[in-house]
Structures are given as structure tokens and as C-alpha cells.
Amino acid sequence: TLSLCTTTTINRSIKRVSTMVRKRLDERVRTLIERGVLRGERSILVLVGDHGKDQVPNLHQILFKTSLQTRPNVLWCYKKELGFSTHRKKRIKKLKRDKARGLTGTSSSVDTADNFELFISSTDINWCYYKDSHRVLGSTVGMLVLQDFEALTPNLMARTIETVRGGGLVVFLMRTVKSLKQLYTMTMDVHARYRTESAGDVVPRFNERFILSLAKCSNCLVCDDELDVLPVSRKTLLGLAPGEVEKGDAGEVILRETPQEMELKELKESLIETPHVGVLVELAKTLDQAKALLVFLEACSEKTHTTSTVAMTAARGRGKSAAMGLCLAGAISLGYSTMAVTAPEPENLVAVFDFLCRGLKALKYQEHLDYSITYNSASGRDAIKCIVAINIHRSHRQVIQYIPPHETDKFSSAEIVAVDEAAAIPLPVVRALMHHPDRLTFLSSTVNGYEGTGRALSLKLIKELRESKGGRQAELNMANAAAGAIAGAKSKKGEAKVHEQRYKAAAEAAGGSGHGEVLTGPLREIELSTPIRYAPGDGVEAWLNKLLCLDSGSSAQLKLNGGAPAPSDCELYSVDRDALFSYHKLSEAFLQKLMGLYTSAHYKNTPNDLQMLSDAP
């Protein structure tokens, strides 16, 4: 009996030890996450395998222990079916049912299920369909999980990855494949739109370019579903040197303040007692935002009886809409009565009105007591509830409302006109909004990003404003140009009356400059370059910009060193799309310039156009 008991005890101990054995994590995965937290940059992990979702709780725990802040919130995006229930009671009921049927397998699989159950119940997770991804714009998360790779599009990728904060993690979940080259030929959901009766087969060139680009991303690792690093991420593996991260007693990464953060802190402290300004600057997240706020409030405080313009340009994710909202809150505190805000759609102004309300709250305005909010009347699944007007009635009646850009007659009484996403509005409409003898115009435009933006339109408008800066100087320039265009006779100048003709031409040019032909008035330019959510120089941003050609419209990409040839010297060539999307160095340079021309010529382009160009028959 004693020997039988001893044998049973030993067997139980062996079984317990076997269930407690854990596979050691590859230190390079931990180093990647720690380095991202230290630098304030995002990291990407591509998990290839059917059980990749079981590693998400482990990665989330590593991320939490590395930063020692509040548990990172998670955005989990999927196509239609998660493969598990997010309802706690249903999960427990299914687990009990599987245990009774003997379907749970080994004790290690039970531990995995319990681990995943604990992760879901204790973490703030936003479950989001891909078709509803427009609802997450403007939010910030610590971890992003992208499931169902076949449903991903360039638009979805850019929209969701942009929500991840610096130090956060982006996880792609892919199915089990024998070779990564199988992903090259994966049929995507969007391919169904490209097929027609007359067209040929769809060739998934975009997938191949996506997989090849991961090897060049400095913050990306490709692993299997047991977190074994695959030899795809050559560039990242070479840069992952252990020991470069300074850690505290609990293993957390010690963060230091950057010079920009210290300068912003000093600026906030110096303005804390300044009325109308101090509390608003306190809400700024970057030094660029704070300076933009000061420039706009300076323009508001002057209240000159001339047309004045403030032009703000920024790349995607720089806090441009937030800065505009805070600026308009400052204008309300300075006493402006009528303000109009316009954008291609009212949904574009959700962030503007959100930060306008935050600014009013910081200025001690109370909703219902000091101001009331009017929402749009749109209904349906795809509709977004957004503010269209705010009426302030503290000292006197003040109103700020959304007006569609084409209804130019309704802007006549506005003292301030704020135009968000000016590049997506036709140029003549924007120019018409700016022609008013006593108006401050606030232009905001995205110079690159995933929204439909015509970079050339905004750059052309700002260039025109810059050249006509100062009003009177613009008139003088036009007068001199008109006078210089009249060539006099070589002899008998008195009889030809050349001087009189030049004087007349100059006077007509100067007099006609204020009739809609040229924009005049002082111009203040603001450029926001520091990202809000992550650090400058983020490797994931550089990778995404190159993959989706988001920065292709910049002047550096489109610069012609040798000048343009004459039309008669031009030749027509047929481009091999297999070579164009092969991710070769030369073909990438050609593709970036090709997309730069396309985005500059049209203002309704999106990153999905790149996939259509590559895959459509």
C-alpha cells in the first residue's frame, strides 16, 4: 500500500511539473517591445499560424510589465467571425461543455484557455468589424490586433495602425502556411470587386509587396504562433542588441524627458497666468500645437479690418484638428460672435468640435448653463453622430456652426471662417470663402496621409497666398509686371507715349487686384511636424508611408532634376506591373513618382487605389 501511494504521488508530481513547463520566450521579441517603449515608437509582430491569437495575452502582459502604466487598451479588428465568444457567461458555459465531452485536450490547452479567458475579462478591448473601422478615428490604443488578413485593405491598414500610441504593439494574425510565399497568392476579399466578365484573372501583387516590405521595416518581427522568430525580418534582427534598455527594479523601462517635452513644460509654466491662453496651451500635447495656438490667438487679438489668413499644414496624426478646435475655443473667449467651420463632410469635424468643447470646459464654460450643442440628424449604421453647431450665451450671443463649403452665401456674416481639409475642397470654393474685407480665415490641410487629398491644390493655394503676402506689396508687384510688359519704341518715345501707357497699365493692374483675381492680406504659416501619439522618426510610420505611397506627393519626390522634355520628344511606354510592384529599389522609386503624379492631379484618391492599380486585371 505504501509503495502504491508513493508511486501515485510521484506520478502526480511528474504530471504537475510537466504542466508547469513553459517554453522560454525569445529575448528578441521582448527587446523589440522594450526598445519601442523606450523610444516612443510602435512595433509590429506578424504571427503566422492558426493559434496566433493564443499568444496575444502573453504579448499584452509583456507590454504591460514593460511600461508599468495602466493596462494597455486593445483594439481588435476582424471581418465577421472572431472564432470565440466575447460574452463571459457563454465562454464559461462552452468551456464546461467541452470539459464534460473531453474536448479540451491536454491540461496545457486548458491553461491556455484560462489565460485567454483572464485576458478578455480583465482588459479593455474594443471589438470592431473592419466595415466599422471609421468609428475608431481619433481614438488611441496601446495594442492593435488585425485578424482575417484576407479582409485587409490599404485603407483599413492605415486607418487602424494610426490609432496605436508610441510604445504600442501592432499584431497581424495570419493562417498557417508552409511557406510565406503562399501568402503572395492569397485571394483577398477586395478582389471580388475587380473581377469582370471580360477581364482576366486577378494577380495579388500587393500581397507580395507587403510581405517583402516587412523585411525592410526596422520595427517588425515575423514569428510563428509559438513566438519563434522567422528569418524574414533581417533588418530588425541586426538592430536588436540586448542591454541597450535601462530598466527599473520591477523590470520596467525607465523613460527620460526629451528636450521638446521639457521646452513644452517650460512654455506651459510661463503662460499659466495668461488669460485666455494659459489653460488652452495646457491642453496641447506637443510644442508645435502650443505654438500654433499662440499664432492663431495672436491673429485673433489684432482684430484688424483687413483680410487675414492663418494657414496650417501637417501630415496625418499631428493633432491638426485638435489644434483647430482649441484655437476656436480661444476665439470664443476673445469675444468673436459669429464663426463658421467647413469641411468636405461634417464627419471630418468630429475632432475639431470635440477639442472645441474641451477648450470651453478648460475656460470654465458649462454646457446647458453657458452653451448648448446641436447634433446632426443622420441615422443608420454608417452614420456618425457629430456636432454641427454650438451656441454660447454667457455674456452675449455667440455661435459657431458647420456650413457646407458650396453654400458660400451663408458665410457672409462670419468673422472667422475655419476650413478643415482644405485640400479636399475645390480650389475656387476655398478662394471664394477667403474674399471678404473683414475676415480671419483659418486654413488647415493635410499634406500627406490616407484621406483623399490633392496636395497640389493646397500647395498651390498657399503658394499664391505667400506670393501675395502683405496686400500692398502684391499690388505693387502686379503694377510693375504690367508696366514692364509694355515695350516702348526705340525712337520717338514721346510720340508713342510709352510712359503714359505704362502708368495706365500699372493703375489698372493695381486697381483690379482686389476683385477676386489675387488673394491679399497678411499670411501666417504654421507647420505641425511632431506626431501626437508616437515619437518623430517612428519606423512603422516610415514603413507605412513607403508601402502605401502616402508621402509620394511631396516636392522632394516629384522634383525633376533635368527639367521636363518637350511634348514632341516624349515617348509612350507600356509598364510591366509585375516589375513595377516587385519591391525592387528602382521600381519603387518609379512607383513613388507615379503615385505622386496621380495624387497631385486628383483630390479624391485613397490608398485603396494603389491595390487596385496593382491587382486589378
Image (tube, rainbow, N blue to C red):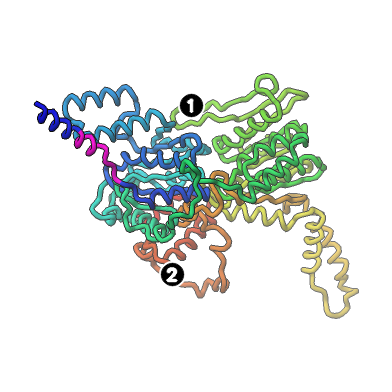
Residue at the right extreme, as displayed: 494
Q: Is residue 90 magenta?
A: no
Q: Are marks 1 and 2 in contact (CB under 8 Å)?
A: no
Q: Nearer the viewer, residue 138 or 445?
A: 138
**How dense is the environment of label 2, judged by Cα within 10 Å: few (below 14), some, or many (20 and up)?**
few
Label 1 vs 2, first from the N-terminus: 1
> Of the residues tagged 1 and 2, which is closer to the observer?
1
Which dot marks residue 594? none
Q: Nearer the viewer, residue 119 or 597?
A: 119
Q: Is residue 115 left or right of residue 291?
A: left
Residue 425: percent from left, percent from top: 59, 45
Decide if residue 200 is in sight here.
Answer: no
Q: Nearer the viewer, residue 94 or 541?
A: 94
Q: Residue at x 52, y 56 (%)?
A: 551
Amino acid at the residue labelled 2: Leu
Q: Residue at x 45, y 27 (%)?
A: 380
Q: Which residues are magenta?
A: 13-23
Mostly what secondary structure, the magenta segment?
helix
Q: Quadrant of residue 85?
A: top left
Q: Is residue 14 magenta?
A: yes
